[in-house]
Image (spheres, coloured by chain):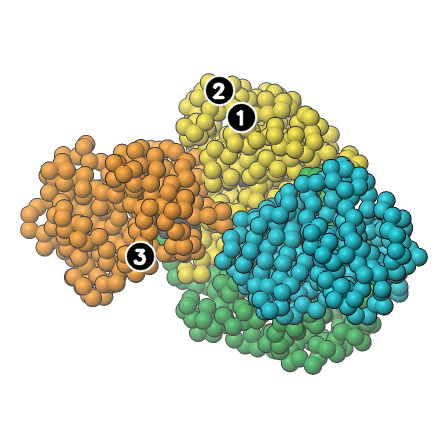
Chain colours: A orange, B cyan, C green, D yellow
Amino acid sequence: MKREWMKIVDHKEIARDTYRLVLQGDIVSDVTDPGQFVHVQVSQDYYLRRPVSISDINPEERTMTLLYKVMGQGTDALTRKAVGEKIDVLGPGGQGFPVESVGTKHALLVGGGIGVPPLHYLAKRLRDRGVKVTSILGFQSKADVFLIEEFKELGNVHVTTNDGSTGHHGLVTDLFFEIDEPFDTYFTCGPTVMLKAVSEHLSHIPGYISMEERMGCGIGACFACVVPAHDEKGYRRICCDGPVFEASEVMLT
Amino acid sequence: MKREWMKIVDHKEIARDTYRLVLQGDIVSDVTDPGQFVHVQVSQDYYLRRPVSISDINPEERTMTLLYKVMGQGTDALTRKAVGEKIDVLGPGGQGFPVESVGTKHALLVGGGIGVPPLHYLAKRLRDRGVKVTSILGFQSKADVFLIEEFKELGNVHVTTNDGSTGHHGLVTDLFFEIDEPFDTYFTCGPTVMLKAVSEHLSHIPGYISMEERMGCGIGACFACVVPAHDEKGYRRICCDGPVFEASEVMLT
Amino acid sequence: MKVTLPGLDLKNPIMPASGCFGFGKEFAQFYDLSELGAVIMKAATQEQRFGNGTPRVAEASSGMLNAIGLQNPGVDNIIEREIPFLQTKDIPIIANVAGSTIEEYVKVAIKISRHVHALELNISCPNVKEGGVQFGTDPELAARVTRQVVEASAVPVYVKLSPNVTDIVAIAKAVEGAGASGLSMINTLTGMRINLQTRKPIIANQIGGLSGAAIKPVAIRMIHQVYTAVNIPIIGMGGVETADDVIEFMLAGASAVAIGSANFKNPLICKEIIDQLPHTLERYGFSTITEVIGGAHHETVTAGLLRP
Amino acid sequence: MKVTLPGLDLKNPIMPASGCFGFGKEFAQFYDLSELGAVIMKAATQEQRFGNGTPRVAEASSGMLNAIGLQNPGVDNIIEREIPFLQTKDIPIIANVAGSTIEEYVKVAIKISRHVHALELNISCPNVKEGGVQFGTDPELAARVTRQVVEASAVPVYVKLSPNVTDIVAIAKAVEGAGASGLSMINTLTGMRINLQTRKPIIANQIGGLSGAAIKPVAIRMIHQVYTAVNIPIIGMGGVETADDVIEFMLAGASAVAIGSANFKNPLICKEIIDQLPHTLERYGFSTITEVIGGAHHETVTAGLLRP
Ligand SMILES: Cc1cc2nc3c(=O)[nH]c(=O)nc-3n(C[C@H](O)[C@H](O)[C@H](O)COP(=O)(O)OP(=O)(O)OC[C@H]3O[C@@H](n4cnc5c(N)ncnc54)[C@H](O)[C@@H]3O)c2cc1C
Ligand SMILES: Cc1cc2nc3c(=O)[nH]c(=O)nc-3n(C[C@H](O)[C@H](O)[C@H](O)COP(=O)(O)OP(=O)(O)OC[C@H]3O[C@@H](n4cnc5c(N)ncnc54)[C@H](O)[C@@H]3O)c2cc1C
Ligand SMILES: Cc1cc2nc3c(=O)[nH]c(=O)nc-3n(C[C@H](O)[C@H](O)[C@H](O)COP(=O)(O)O)c2cc1C
Ligand SMILES: Cc1cc2nc3c(=O)[nH]c(=O)nc-3n(C[C@H](O)[C@H](O)[C@H](O)COP(=O)(O)O)c2cc1C
Ligand code: FES
Ligand code: FES
């Protein structure tokens, strides 16, 4: 893990309040797994860093793509950073989705809203290993949809929206039985309610979920980001034991 | 008095750690007297505004010139503001040097360091009324000297430096008896020790001094910037009763 | 936007805080003071006071220190020369009453309460050697001075609490028991900055009062604690700089909000927040301002990081 | 840069503060911990503790709130699994000792003091329901727990004071009288933030501890007050982010300085400040670090806004 002033090489709004930020620097070469994140210092006006998942990397160009949604003051301020500026980044952090170690043949990726980005790099890595990838991506409304074309290049894609303005009108879980070929493993990232619903529906197969919590240090030292676990240890730190966990490992509340 | 986002139209280092900042906006047309100041919000990172004297104005171009020296974090941050940016200014504030109401024929202007700037606009205004102007300008060292050419266009100029690297080696007060033609009124701005020395040496003639104090509001409401006065009221607020006072009005401590 | 409190019919819940607005004249050049919910004047003492030495202010991260030392022209001069100007505006006037002894508090209250709509009893000024703050840190003394001022006053009394105490709830309950009509909280936290060049405290008085955004979490915490312990309204203050802050203070339990040092950053701040407030209320799903008061205590929305 | 304190030979006066550095491992990937003056570990309790619900942190202006709730693996696990790693580094280790009862404090102190150079007795954690902070707000209780822990401990005891009190000097004197070898101040100020969307406190525990630059003036004020009242050294903390801040704390009266939440902004902060310190000392005209300690009390340079 490094602290680095990374250079902004691209920065665009790609959907409603949703931005693509491409950063260049050495941190890129330390990224090992899809689902890892970086801890971004928006500016000195914000005391805490913001965790943002790595959505894709390009090792040759030493760039990583982050997709973020404006949720509050920090992400709003982030939108005003211009191409060419440098930004203080700590990373890569955490344990991502396992790719090599899982014996999956057909993976189901379930993303909700701003939980979709880390699944993109995951889908690429799975595809590169010859795994069949099917994705269900849920958004609030048509205006919020992003990355669909990118996922289509990697496998089948089903889109849902809460208001039915595009794709299926309803929840991601509605579509599980519409996937004709059986899948053997699931990978999911999104709001906690969604993670819970997905893991309950798919409790019969192995699954990996990526979680969110407010962070202090982002490196495992402060115990801000814990989630209760089923074993004797009793907890996991999202920033370093996660953010990705086996579905059976942690308690979703 | 107004609060205005003024446009930076020029910004340059003109002597060691000393910058000229030219601002454009409506506040300029409200300036009445030399010696008034503006209250500058450097950025949201600084809780208090910084008072800076108006060194000159150009009513046609709606610009004012400020000269400031880097003394701490706020003025240091100010150096990084670029031409074209806007800056939050409150002003013009305070009572400046009297020009019309004083019957001076030959005025002595005594400036010390970053107290020199407001005397520049004063000298211009006095010259415009046909008053003879002689200036004694004291600096720490040759590298700190500025505005000399500008003052020379307006009258005789004597320069002193603490280290003798240019001009007279010593204090501004050393030169009082070297001025051949008698002067009838003095105007001074600079560090409090200097103001004190000047007013003691020249107690036989009328004089006007410009004072400094840490400010809160800068508009007369908070009583942060008081100086003891000799009358029954007992005090003056530097931000609105001053910064310029008759030498006999206030107590210099 | 209307809020009705003992003695105060506020057309909106925003007012400038004591000591940060003088007696209003300086701010009247920026906007019409009639737009305010009310105005709280600079502290009044019996005699004229000259206050502390200078420097009296210092900067801090997200805040400032001050040690003005209650400089004011004395209660008679305030009544004669300052209140008449404010009376031309269509707003309730609150007088901040200070003193070194209970007798002084009472004398000032008797005089000034005839000319204003409410008193703010300042038992919390950290910047004077005698009087003031010891009344604000001891529940018994706080109750005693409150009781006597309430008796002497012609108008409702709001007691301004000091945050520099171990148990703010104990003080709040004591002054409620002594007849306070409301509370005003918080005054400044005592703090110090040292000048590295001179190696001395920046402020001549050494210690000053910390105000501004830096103290907001402390203010919110104290208002939240006191709200459930008393049955009198709270005027909240301490770091209010935005309309969002106003909502945060009111959710914690404030019925109205005072803005102090932010007036120095932006002399138009009170007016700007008043203008933004209707929109801000709407954005967070409130239909009236009174709905916000104490919301953090009785809301049933589940907390969490859920998002669509 | 050397400072010698009871039990602690510091090669420089900089150490990470308790709870902000875990047990060091995570930061060892950024720099060699041997560069530190010392290290203060996360609080140890007798049994493993799981701490509070989440969210446990919230942002504030120039600071943050936390309510971790003393989550830690318990004293035995700390001795077995954490201290050995720190012992490979060439630095004094300070154990932060917490508990719900005096008995728990004593038991933890007995065990852990055999493996470290000093104890930091945490009687000021604001984030646990029982124990902890009531010991820090009552001089008698503070003295009682201090006396028993000092007796039980094999190494010098520094007592960590809570700033959430009316009279910090009274507590400081009480623990000095009870045998403390030093003080550590300040812990966090209690505060709250409310989420306007959910209308609830952001932190699950509702109240959290405010740390960061926002509290620096309060820390400086308290250290300045306590320095003249006691004869034991002070480890200062609360908002240290720069080498200038270190000088300010030491001028106020600290003999060493701990850095807490700033480690989250920049994991290299302790090392960077250590590297800058010699230059900063020189800039302000000091030739040794010990010269700085308490400088604001005995310097004779006249304060003022004078400039050349
Ligand atoms: C491991 C991880 C990966 C993430 N990846 C992405 C991503 O790829 N794209 C994206 O848009 N968002 C992502 N998030 C969520 C993102 O961190 C928050 O939306 C963001 O921090 C909100 O900051 P703000 O300044 O807009 O909000 P504010 O409300 O101003 O933030 C205040 C504080 O709360 C924290 N906070 C607020 N919401 C969240 C949240 N949902 N999760 C964690 N901390 C929060 C902030 O970090 C900050 O410390 C991720 C979160 C985690 C934990
Ligand atoms: C009426 C008036 C006119 C001035 N005109 C000029 C000018 O034309 N050019 C110029 O370079 N300087 C001028 N000054 C001084 C200038 O305001 C300070 O140098 C500046 O505020 C220092 O800010 P800083 O951020 O660098 O220092 P910091 O030490 O970071 O400032 C911290 C706080 O102290 C205040 N402060 C520090 N030094 C002074 C001081 N000497 N006077 C008042 N407040 C101070 C700052 O405003 C700020 O609030 C004037 C001061 C006054 C009162
Ligand atoms: C310069 C200054 C002067 C103050 N004078 C008074 C006063 O006379 N009486 C009083 O009760 N409070 C006084 N206060 C405290 C404020 O009214 C307010 O309680 C405090 O500043 C917190 O609010 P803020 O963070 O919005 O400034 C003063 C504050 C400042 C900054
Ligand atoms: C996340 C977090 C956890 C903390 N845990 C402890 C602790 O376990 N024991 C303790 O004595 N202090 C603890 N503290 C307080 C710090 O040690 C320190 O006293 C305080 O944060 C002020 O310093 P700072 O402003 O540099 O952070 C904690 C602070 C933070 C921010
Ligand atoms: S954020 Fe500090 S342990 Fe995870
Ligand atoms: S700075 Fe407020 S009265 Fe002068």
Mark 1 vs mark 2: same chain? Answer: yes
Question: Could you tell me if the residues under marks 1 and 2 are in contact, i.e. CB atoms within 8 Å?
Answer: yes
Q: Residue A184: give x, y in percent of width and height.
A: 12, 41
Residue pointed to by mark 2 = D89
The disc at residue D36 is: 1
Q: Looking at the picture, tell me which residue is in the foreground, A40 or B146.
A: B146
Give the residue drawn at x 57%, y 63%.
B24
Whether residue C195 is visible to the viewer of this picture, yes or no, is: yes
For this orientation, the residue located farthest to the left is A180
Badge 1, how many Cα within 10 Å: few under 14, some, many 20+? Answer: many
Amino acid type at image mark 2: Lys
Q: Is B169 on the left-hand or right-hand side of D196?
A: right
Q: Report the Cα–Cα distance between label 1 and label 3.
A: 44 Å
Q: Chain of mark 2?
A: D
Q: Report the Cα–Cα distance between label 1 and label 2.
A: 9 Å
Q: Residue D69: give x, y in percent of width and height.
A: 48, 41
Q: Chain of mark 1?
A: D
Amino acid type at image mark 3: Glu
Badge 2, how many Cα within 10 Å: few under 14, some, many 20+? Answer: some
**Which part of the image, by quadrant, shows the N terminus of chain B?**
bottom right
Q: Closer to us: mark 1 or mark 2?
A: 1
Give the residue drawn at x 52%, y 60%.
B86
Give the residue drawn at x 27%, y 50%.
A115
Give the residue drawn at x 23%, y 66%.
A163
Give the answer, above or below, for where B180 lies relative to C277. Answer: above
Question: Could you tell me if the residues under marks 3 and 2 are in contact, i.e. CB atoms within 8 Å?
Answer: no
Q: Report the Cα–Cα distance between label 3 and label 2.
A: 48 Å
For this orientation, the residue located farthest to the right is B204
Give the answer, above or below, for where C286 lies relative to A159. Answer: below
Residue pointed to by mark 3 = A13
